[in-house]
Amino acid sequence: MKDIIQKDNQYFFNVFGKRIAQLTHGGNCNLYDENGKKYTDFLAGIAVNCLGYSDEGFKTAVKNQVDSLIHVSNYFYNEPQTLLAEELCTKTGFSKVFFSNSGAEANECAIKIAKKYAFEKGIINGEFITLKNSFHGRTVATLFATGQNKFHVPYNPSPYPFNYIDANDLAQLNTITKDTYGVIIEVIQGEGGVIPLNMEYVKNLREICTKYDVPLIIDEVQTGMGRTGKFLAQEHYGIKGDIATLAKGLGNGIPIGACLAYSKFADVFKQGDHGSTFGGNLLACRAGLYVTQHIEPLFSHITTVGEYFREKLKCISKKIIDVRGLGLMIGAQLCEDVSAHDVFKTLFEKGFIIGTSGFNTLRFVPPYIITKKEIDEVIHVLGEVLN
Ligand SMILES: *Cc1c(COP(=O)(O)O)cnc(C)c1O
């Protein structure tokens, strides 16, 4: 382990700061470090490992794909890719899908579609509109789509004009005009601190985008794939985006992203307009297909235990000043005299992996199979730590 720490410092770009332990294996909702110490996992690789660590069907599907063929170029038909595209369209109502390797890339695809759609209407001096405190990825375009200035400074100028408006402020929706290239939102801001948008705001935004024929892009990289108890979180709002993006939970740990769109938008891409070497490869799509076919029976569990978890969080300590989220995407904001990062570290020592996000907020995004018993355990320990 000492050797790994030394080599990691020497050879790896230090963008993630000091790492914690080395996790070597998992089972159900538990992870184990190299000393065999057990941790209950409420982070799931940042909302990725939605089926937990013991799903034999998933492991078999992936192993079988490895044994037959991992990758072919996108010049060839690809059964898991086609079937996954069909499955995603059937479950969400969108018309077409393009696959990528990550959330940021799925958003890049959405941004390019919107830009070309505007271009074909003759709009060339427009702008994108996104929300302050959002997060859309780390590629150059998605970094600037992200409405947090701290990320932008060394990388200016932005490839496109992005105008950042305040979430939930109806008055600022008048920024949207017929010249807007597209509007990008998360219906629950994840990295921003698990902050849901208001119902009225989302409905108004949808109407205005329709009125001006501006594509509404909903980034469901974190909220999608059942995380909130519905396939897409936008279903809670009773609206549909024109384009939606998925990634994190889609492959249960195998890297894959997807951009979903109605034909009106998807069809602006003609042969040669977009592409990806790895995007939608056999292995990734086999994993995605398995996940997509197996999460729906978990939705009612996600809803019930998520509600249970939030109710418990509201009662354990006065140090928790706000509890937010839907399904198993939960944020608990702490008062200013306790640091979320310190709580995260203490819980880790006590055998629980949680996350932090936004302003002093604890984030819980466990595998969908998390039990009430495991929730009771983290609640008990968190109560002790906070009080
Ligand atoms: C994580 C995340 C992304 C970026 O996904 P990557 O796979 O890291 O590129 C984009 N949007 C949202 C909402 C996310 O939570």
Image (cartoon, grey):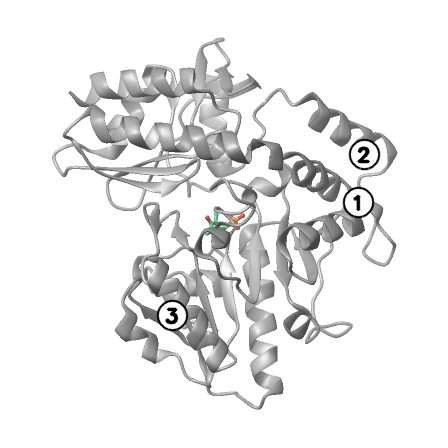
Specify whether tag 2 is near ligand 1 (CB below 8 Å): no
The reply to whether residue 10 is in sight is no
Please, what secondary structure does the residue beneath circle 3 have? helix
Q: Quadrant of the C terminus?
A: top left
Camera-side mark, 3 or 1? 3
Quadrant of the rendered structure where residue 272 is? bottom right
Q: Position of residue 158 (x, y in %)?
A: 43, 71
Query: Would residue 207 be found to the left or right of residue 284 on screen?
Result: left
Tag of residue 80: 1
Q: Nearer the viewer, residue 375 or 39?
A: 375
Task: Specify which label sits upstream in the sequence, 2 or 3.
Answer: 2
* Identity, as a three-letter code, of the amino acid under mark 2: Gln
The reply to whether residue 287 is in sight is yes
**Would you name the residue on which mark 2 appears?**
65
Q: Do the residues bearing badges 2 and 1 touch, measured as CB atoms within 8 Å?
A: yes
* Identity, as a three-letter code, of the amino acid under mark 1: Pro
Q: Position of residue 61 (x, y in %)?
A: 76, 30
Q: Do the residues bearing badges 2 and 3 touch, measured as CB atoms within 8 Å?
A: no
Query: Would residue 362 be found to the left or right of residue 384 on screen?
Result: right
Please, what secondary structure does the residue beneath circle 2 have? helix
Q: Nearer the viewer, residue 164 or 317?
A: 317
Tag of residue 204: 3
* Identity, as a three-letter code, of the amino acid under mark 3: Asn
